[in-house]
Image: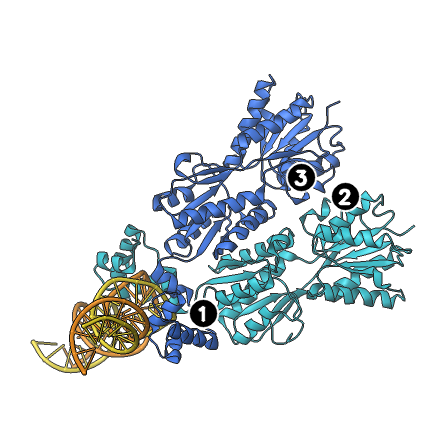
Chain colours: A cyan, B blue, C yellow, D orange
Amino acid sequence: MAVTIKDIAKLANVAPSTVSRVLANNSVISEKTKKRVQKAIEELGYHPNLNARSLINQTTNAIGIVMPDSASKTFQNPFFPEVIRGISSFIHTKEYSLYMLTGETQEEIYNGVVKMVQGRRVDGIVLLYSRIDDKIMHYLIEQDFPFVLIGKPQNFAQEITYIDNDNYSAGKDAADYLINLGHRHIAFIGGNPDLMVTKERLSGFKEALKNAGLEIPEEYICHMEFLQEGGKEAVEQLILLKQPPTAIVVTDDLMALGVLSTLSEKGYNVPDDLSVISFNNVIFSEISNPPLTSVDVRIFQLGYESAQSLVEKIKSPNLLPKNIIVPYKIVERQSCKTPK
Amino acid sequence: MAVTIKDIAKLANVAPSTVSRVLANNSVISEKTKKRVQKAIEELGYHPNLNARSLINQTTNAIGIVMPDSASKTFQNPFFPEVIRGISSFIHTKEYSLYMLTGETQEEIYNGVVKMVQGRRVDGIVLLYSRIDDKIMHYLIEQDFPFVLIGKPQNFAQEITYIDNDNYSAGKDAADYLINLGHRHIAFIGGNPDLMVTKERLSGFKEALKNAGLEIPEEYICHMEFLQEGGKEAVEQLILLKQPPTAIVVTDDLMALGVLSTLSEKGYNVPDDLSVISFNNVIFSEISNPPLTSVDVRIFQLGYESAQSLVEKIKSPNLLPKNIIVPYKIVERQSCKTPK
DNA sequence: AAATATAATGCAATCGTTTGCAAATTCCAT
DNA sequence: ATGGAATTTGCAAACGATTGCATTATATTT
């Protein structure tokens, strides 16, 4: 049987309440008994039962992180370890711990979230994605449960604390980058169109082309899975067009990898025959062949800041929502070039 | 205020104990009241408070996963997301949830572990690494707390449930692979020498060279960080030797990446000037330049099986320990070749 | 030494469940 | 109708902490 506060009390010859107070470093306890109790704690190797504590305090000192659905696929994307790293890094300074929720379907995750929330397992939640019309987000709002969003919410932007890049501008900049290189036929390969990132980057992309007076044939816009295979499929379609693009904006490095390898299989050279720019600048974008020009969105910082905002929000629930926009930067490598 | 079992009881006009029993689907409750209670639960959107439950049941339905120290670095290695994916995938079928523990120093993690364990936050733990003389493992053994190890324990192998590859043989096979290609000067770049993986792969490596009657100059054995930089440093030392190796065994793909890029910086061609074989076969090993010949250790399966063993162990604590050896396979790509 | 003020401790209720046991209800046979 | 068994339900004590309030011990003043 585990050692409880009562055991300490008995050993130190005080009441449990006294022990509790020395644990809380309550100043009302005399130095003498404080010492005595601490010795007992030391001796028995006591550690408070966190469940009991949570029960009475209505607080857990844990935060939950919710991954997008089909975790089994999505976790392959180095984006996620990197955000988590950022989150971890912050919460560690605040003595919070980390609950992780994954799942294959949205339904499964939704159930996990209500269990977490109503079961009082965590004090707050960070959503690692922003999906259009997301049931989970609605639920959290309705429950008035502390949460922050990595990404931009579709609605209620004023009422939600979120951490994001300016993905619209980033999409625009990426496209402009290619336009400035002289490209006139630029395609877009995006991930799940229900995700706000995809949407935003796409509208930025379109805006840039429009400003430059360029056409956007419908077939130039593809939406695929956020994985290598997604990139592969998209490329296979694009190169069959009568007027294939000379450049592609890809919304995710992992997809870009698929693009690259498929292109090389089919005998195309990047960047000589086709330029590719992508997003996230994850660890392997510099080691691909050729190294990818990619928009660095500072994933770690997204994670770190989101955790920070969440903890703030937990501590002061009626703080006003805030939005943090993390800067991005195009890091140029060797996958883009002026077209022939 | 959250809705509790008492609210349900009041609404359904029964005692809390009755509600509890229908929740547990206790057969002693009549169909009629069961229906009534369920309706009330539905109506108020009740979900049990998990802390209260844990407190009385002495069980949490959560497992903890413990990362190696310096999480901020180590998490960059795709090995970890992939094990976690395996773990997640299993525990999801069992309605367990996931606690994640990271930290910069071993001390920090140790404290996290005792907090988790004594604080009764989790029912069991999976250690994602095996370190020589690991304080945390000793603690878990001493506390008789359910845990499993990914990797091979240094001692007590009989008393600990662990999931591992046969890293000794894998190291041997990797070296033999190079030997069979005709290499006579083979170096070894390993990660932290305190980790059992490193140790085992190294002894396999040595055995192979010994059997082939090859020398192993001391400078041929390097121990570095499990990161790209580690690979970089090692290479810089190796190429300065009067007799530089013609092939290298690297114990981790990420390090191998550093090896590859450094080699190419210095004007060496892989595999023409130097062969490289590494371990883990993580996602990017096929997209590096050149694609890496790597020993696939089935990371996902390591995770999946470990979770399964842990849950078994939690449910039947006096089950005998067992060891699961997951098969590995060398997947040949383009980083190895017969020396000139 | 008594009265009062102050500091230190303890009592007991509480958080939201579960569960052994007692009490109440229903059922059936007489 | 009545007794007794079988079926349902409720009471109350846990689980291990925290905390407002009462109480006791100590210090201060007269």
Describe the element under mark 1 as helix, strand or loop: loop
Residue B69 % position (x, y): 51, 46
Instruction: Give the foreground label among 1 and 3.
Output: 1
Occupied quadrant, residue A325: bottom right
The subunit carrying tag 2 is: A
Q: CA distance from mark 1 to mark 2?
A: 51 Å
Q: Please tell me the numbered disc located at residue A289.
A: 2
The subunit carrying tag 1 is: B
Pick the front one: A168 or B173 = B173
In the rendered structure, which amino acid carries the disc numbered 1? His
Q: Are marks 2 and 3 on the same chain?
A: no
Q: Are marks 1 and 2 on the same chain?
A: no
Residue A177 % position (x, y): 82, 58
Occupied quadrant, residue B56: bottom left
Can you identify the residue that label 1 sits on?
A: B47
Residue B8 % position (x, y): 40, 76
In the rendered structure, which amino acid carries the disc numbered 2? Asn
- Image height check: is A107 above or below B213? below
- Image height check: is A58 above or below B211? below
Q: CA distance from mark 1 to mark 3?
A: 50 Å
Instruction: Give the foreground label among 2 and 3.
Output: 2
Can you identify the residue that label 3 sits on?
A: B258
Instruction: Give the foreground label among 1 and 2.
Output: 1
Q: Residue at the spot x=71%, y=66% of the render?
A: A166
Describe the element under mark 3 as helix, strand or loop: helix
Describe the element under mark 2 as helix, strand or loop: loop
Pick the front one: A273 or A138 = A138
Pick the front one: A35 or B304 = B304
Residue neighbourhood size for the residue with mark 2, other residues' Cα within 10 Å, grouped as few (<14), some (14–19), many (≥20): many
Q: Are marks 1 and 3 on the same chain?
A: yes
Q: CA distance from mark 2 to mark 3?
A: 15 Å
Observer able to see residue B2: no
